[in-house]
Image: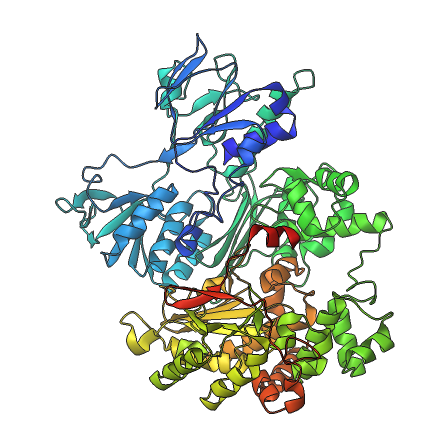
Amino acid sequence: MVGHRFCEKLVEFGGTDKFEITVLGEEPRRAYDRVHLSEYFADKSADSLYLCTPDWYRSNGIKLLLSEPATSIDTIKRKLVTSLGTELDFDELIFATGSSPFVPPLEGLDKEGVFVYRTIEDLEQTMEYSKKVKKAAVLGGGLLGLEAAKALVDLGKETHVVEFAPRLMPRQLDDGGAAILKSKIEEIGVEIHLNKQTEKVLGNEKIEGFEFKDGGNLQFDMLIVSAGIRPRDELAKEAGIAVGERGGIIVDDGMGTNVYGIYAIGEVALHRNFIYGLVAPGYEMAETLAFNLCSPGSKPKVYIGSDLSTKLKLIGVEVASFGDALGQSEHIPIVFKNPRSGVYKKLVISPDGKYLLGGILVGDAKAYGNLLSFYLNKMELPEEPETLIVGSVSAENLFGADALPDEAKICSCNNVSKGNILTAIREKECYDITSLKNCSKAGSGCGGCLPQVNSILKAELKVQGKVVTEHLCEHFKFSRKELFQVIKVKALKSFPDVIKEVGRGNGCEVCKPAVASILASVWNEPILKHREIQDTNDKYLANIQRGGTYSVVPRIPGGEITPEKLIAIGDVAKKYNLYCKITGGQRIDLLGARIDQLPAIWKDLIEFGFESGHAYGKSMRTVKSCVGSTWCRFGVQDSTSFAIKLEERYKGIRAPHKLKCGVSGCIRECAEARGKDFGIIATERGWNLYIGGNGGVNPKHAILFAEDLDEDTCVKYIDRYMMFYIRTADKLMRTSTWLEQLEGGIDYLKDVVINDRLGINSQLDEEMNALVNTYLCEWKDVVEDTEKQKKFRHFVNSSETDPNIKFIEERGQIRPVDWVEKDLVNS
């Protein structure tokens, strides 16, 4: 990660014009995000972790050699040799070799079943081996160790964590914070063993457990070692480059080693006798060195050390620490602790009570961004600093973006100041939060600073006299959210009414479908009442496919279907010669239908008890499920029944974008619930609700919203979440994007849905019930109306079918003929 950031900065500072750049990588992959490595267990794909596109290096003039590490360096001749025997000359050499997992020198840790947690290949080997074990352990209770434990739990293993120290995360948390974290982690089934010194590794060829010095023992079939890191400095040491007594390449404030023209950055660098194990300091080092190499005539940048503040979500628990969190300097501690709710907050303040020296937050880290500003910018505390973590006064109310100086650090992950953010807004015209994140990097790390970033953005736009409009289009001076409320309050029920009352002109291809969606969400009338303002799919209640035909997807709630209905689908497909495919949402897609055939196909399906699956609409699509406790030996709840209940409840509900759900009967997650707009995963005590995920072009993981819910409470929260999204999201905005841009994020949404912060929960409940109670199968609406059926033909003035529709046979079914090159050119 640090090596890649160095390359990015070289490109930014014009280094590609000054240097011929070669990057050597030991792994077979380009740079990827190790911070979120655990997400690989859920995604099973590296695509979401990569830090750049496959052609990024080449397009920026950088030569990338993968699976080809350097094996020897000659500092005199300025040459290095790679593992493939390639000889490379160099003028400047940068070590960004990072670190390797530290495996304690304990006899027996080379047995089968022992793994480390560092690379994607490590994770792949771990997942493969885990298929044949039931009980696993992690050696190490630090940050990575707990991430590994969560991964093992997600793999369905009985999981134990063994820690030498008397508390978890001993470098970040004190006894009180660690105790709360321990109780929260134990709630999900991880057993914690503290103060344990391993004396013997049990087993012959395969590991079978530990014997401890205190006489106890622990039996398990698989072990992940996460006992710290060691700098990858062996190559430097062999080349005569100075390293520290306990490892790490010694560097000065310019990242230079004792050999001219050779540098080190990241976890391999020993700076002022300290090695940083976080990515943010490595990024600072990378920027410092890249600037100095590319700007020889300028005043050199100096690296003086980094802030170790960090905020993360660990096994569903928010954890943050910053500054002198453990109170090692002269200080006064202020502590708030609520074991019942699993919240621990600690502020470390100066003896005179004026300044914040550090802090710890466990279970509730909403105040992290503002507290960090107090600490980083040495701002004076209020007279009663305890109000920052208890009571009604929040740090946000005590100062705004205007009160911060330009040099104030806002994003510690990427070392971004308020001045950097203002420059991006003023000079690069980053007028929205997405472009501002991409341009300045602020908020692209842990995300804890996003509320402040957004506040700075809004304040600056106000100063510039800019009106940030979110108009739907030129025909409506309203955002979708505003137009939703106008239509509801004024009881407008058609596009002509809406455009006449609050718009202008005749409308366009942007506002027409958006208004149609709003009308459907508010009044839930047959969608074809607004047929003329719909796009093609909604106009014909089917998805148009390549070749000009349409697909028909009947609803199969929860994926559960009787043999008779399976036969019925087969009969319909055979009758109309349709191509059949099982979808990813556990339904059957029938493709190849002509427009004029659609009503007849629907009629046949409806006679067998089917109805529209709404696969064509910006609406509730599917609720995917596993077989749950009904059939699966691992299931802890009946996921199929719950999935059917949810799909029957929400079927046909229109929204700004399509909606999908998954219900998994255990943490093995066979229904892929965390890749859905809302997903539910069974626990021994009920259901965990996740929201804001999706697949598609930009896959997003859903975020844990609430835990161990009973079915009724879970449904109530989903009702409100969906209605609040339908009310407030922009046109064609997925729930994940909506949640990312929602001011206050997940914490604010919890406050709205669970605590009724806005006092609208009863209205949200009523609105959802109204939609549920007025459901109408859109196919059946057409089948029962001969006038509507007349619209389903290819030519307005003829009953002839489309002569351009042609099929060929492949694997026993039809498919459209291939496009020829001239057709593609003409199109």
Tell me residue 506's x, y (percent): 84, 71
In the image, 553 versus 716, the foreground residue is 553
Tell me residue 629's x, y (percent): 32, 76
Query: Residue most toward the top?
Result: 76
- Observer able to see residue 654: no
The color scheme shown is: rainbow
Tell me residue 380's x, y (percent): 70, 44
Q: Quadrant of residue 152?
A: bottom left
Tell me residue 502's x, y (percent): 85, 74
* Left or right of 541 in this view: 589: left
Q: Is residue 582 above or below residue 525?
A: above
Viewport quadrant of the C terminus: bottom right
In the image, 114 versus 492, the foreground residue is 492
**Residue drawn at 61 percent across, 24 percent down:** 16
Total labels drawn: 0
Q: Is residue 663 above or below residue 228?
A: below
Q: Is residue 190 above or below residue 728?
A: above
Query: Residue most toward the left?
Result: 204
* Left or right of 562 in this view: 790: right
**Residue drawn at 55 percent across, 44 percent down:** 322
In the image, 339 versus 454, the foreground residue is 454
- Observer able to see residue 545: yes
In the image, 523 versus 485, the foreground residue is 523
* Left or right of 99 in this view: 535: right
* Left or right of 799 in this view: 646: left
